[in-house]
């Protein structure tokens, strides 16, 4: 099997989870991806952006673009791609009745591509990434 090497220029964190206090799903993001998000929350809490999501309506593409801009995606295309990622992540969360879905890191490459980085652990399998691929995500293993 051959694969194209993709080098991340910047790494981000993105997760959707149920926020019990707000009683709604939230999208938790940070421009400090690729590391333990708990450490970011402890040492630099202002680096984390929490966005409540209406359960029925989901996240709009416009809301996703605004969030991508706040996170520092530079080009309009990468902002649109990041927004698509957030919208798809919520669709997977809702369709799979998940309690949490986490992408760490989510990466922007030198050429502006936005990728979901997936790590397959011993207890997981490639079936783990199937929903991501089914929803049109560019998965980087």
Image (spheres, rainbow, N blue to C red):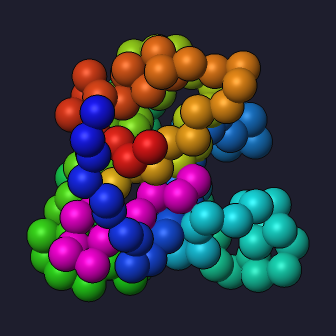
Residue at 61% x, 64% y is 34
The answer to which of 33 and 111 lies nearer the viewer is 111
Please tell me which residue is depicted at 57% across the width and 54% down the height of the picture: 104
* Residue drawn 21% across the image and 34% down it: 136
Above or below 104: residue 66? below
Whole-percent x, y for residue 122 in the image? 71, 25
Q: Is residue 62 visible?
A: no
For this view, does 96 lie left or right of residue 16? left
- Judge whether 71 appears above or below 28 on screen: below
Among all residues in the image, which is located at the extreme right? 42
Residue 129 visible in the shown view: yes
Place of residue 73 in the rendered image (x, y in percent of width and height, measured from the top left): 32, 78
Quick check: 68 above or below 57? below
132 relative to 138 in the view: left or right: right
Q: Is residue 90 magenta?
A: no
Main secondary structure found in the magenta portion? strand
Please report the residue visible at 32 percent of the width from the left and 62 percent of the height from the top: 6
Residue in front for this viewpoint, 8 or 136: 8
Up-down relation of residue 14 to residue 72 (above or below) = above
Q: Position of residue 133 (x, y in %)?
A: 29, 28
Image quarter of residue 70: bottom left
- Looking at the rendered structure, the number of numbered marks drawn on it comes to 0
Q: Nearer the viewer, residue 130 or 49?
A: 130
Q: What segment is highlighted magenta in the picture?
A: 104-114
């Amino acid at each position: 099997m051959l694969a194209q090497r993709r080098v991340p220029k910047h790494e981000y964190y993105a997760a959707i989870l149920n926020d019990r206090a707000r009683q709604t799903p939230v999208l938790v993001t940070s421009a400090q991806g690729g590391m333990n998000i708990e450490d970011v929350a402890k040492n630099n809490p202002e680096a984390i952006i929490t966005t409540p999501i209406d359960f029925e309506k989901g996240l709009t593409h416009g809301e996703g673009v605004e969030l991508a801009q706040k996170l520092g995606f530079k080009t309009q295309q990468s902002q649109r791609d990041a927004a698509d990622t957030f919208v798809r992540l919520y669709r997977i969360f809702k369709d799979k009745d998940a309690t949490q879905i986490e992408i760490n890191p989510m990466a922007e490459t030198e050429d502006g591509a936005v990728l979901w980085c997936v790590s397959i652990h011993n207890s997981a399998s490639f079936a783990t990434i199937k929903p991501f691929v089914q929803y049109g995500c560019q998965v980087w293993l």
